[in-house]
Image: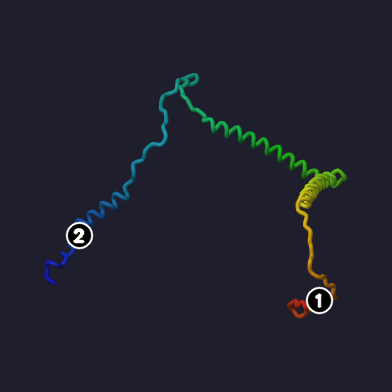
Amino acid sequence: MPDHDQPPAWQPRMTDVEATAEARRIIADAYRPVPQMPTSYRDETPLPPYGSTPPVPQPDCRIVPAWAAGMAVAGIGTGAAFVGVGCGIWLACKGFAAVTLTGVLFVTLPTAAVAAVAAAIGSAVRAIKTTRSETHHHYAGPVRLEHHTITAPAYGLIARNRNNLTR
């Protein structure tokens, strides 16, 4: 291969002295303290020798968005509702804990009422279904009445059923 086809040999861009100086500069920059910006302000105005300090105007023009006010009202309403539900649950648990006739009736009567309503609805639905779809079976083939016996032996550690139909 001729010399002009080979890429040129890599030449360093800095001398060793320049590279050392640059490395020291980079390290010094990395460890240099960052100037701090003040995050608070202290008013150094002298106070009057007696009496209270004069008022300073503090303009406040915050406007509450409508959705935020609505959420606040909804939160208060929801909280009040849950307090009512919690009180109801507490009273119900207090009623469950009382082992008296009143306590037993407190538990059983609502449950029996719900079960009775469910049974009534179920029987009404079944009655509606029965009146709509009446099926009539018309058999045209011969009917045989024979004696059939089924023997089902099951024995062994793991039982396996073999149903044998004999005529």
Q: Secondary structure at mark 2?
A: helix
Marks 1/2: CA–CA distance: 104 Å
Judge from the rendering whether residue 23 lies leftward or rightward of residue 9; answer left or right: right
Residue 22: name its quadrant. bottom left
Q: Position of residue 66 (x, y in %)?
A: 53, 30
Which of the pair 58/125 is nearer the observer? 125
Mark closer to the observer (1, 2): 1
Q: Is residue 35 above or below residue 18?
A: above
The residue located at (18%, 63%) in the rendering is 10
**Is residue 111 shown to the viewer in this render?**
no
What residue is at 18 percent from the left and 58 percent from the top? 13
- Left or right: 1 as drawn, with respect to 166: left
Mark 2 belongs to which amino acid?
A: Asp
SS of the residue under disc 1: strand
Image quarter where the C terminus lies is bottom right
- Of residues 131 and 140, the one drawn nearer to the viewer in this rendering: 140
The residue drawn where x is 69% and y is 38% is: 83
Q: Residue furthest right?
A: 101
Q: Position of residue 121 (x, y in %)?
A: 78, 47
The residue where tag 1 is placed is 150
Identify the image quadrant of the N terminus: bottom left
Residue 27 visible within the image: yes
Q: Report x, y in % for residue 161.
A: 75, 76
**Which disc is residue 16 wearing?**
2
Q: Is residue 124 above or below residue 141?
A: above
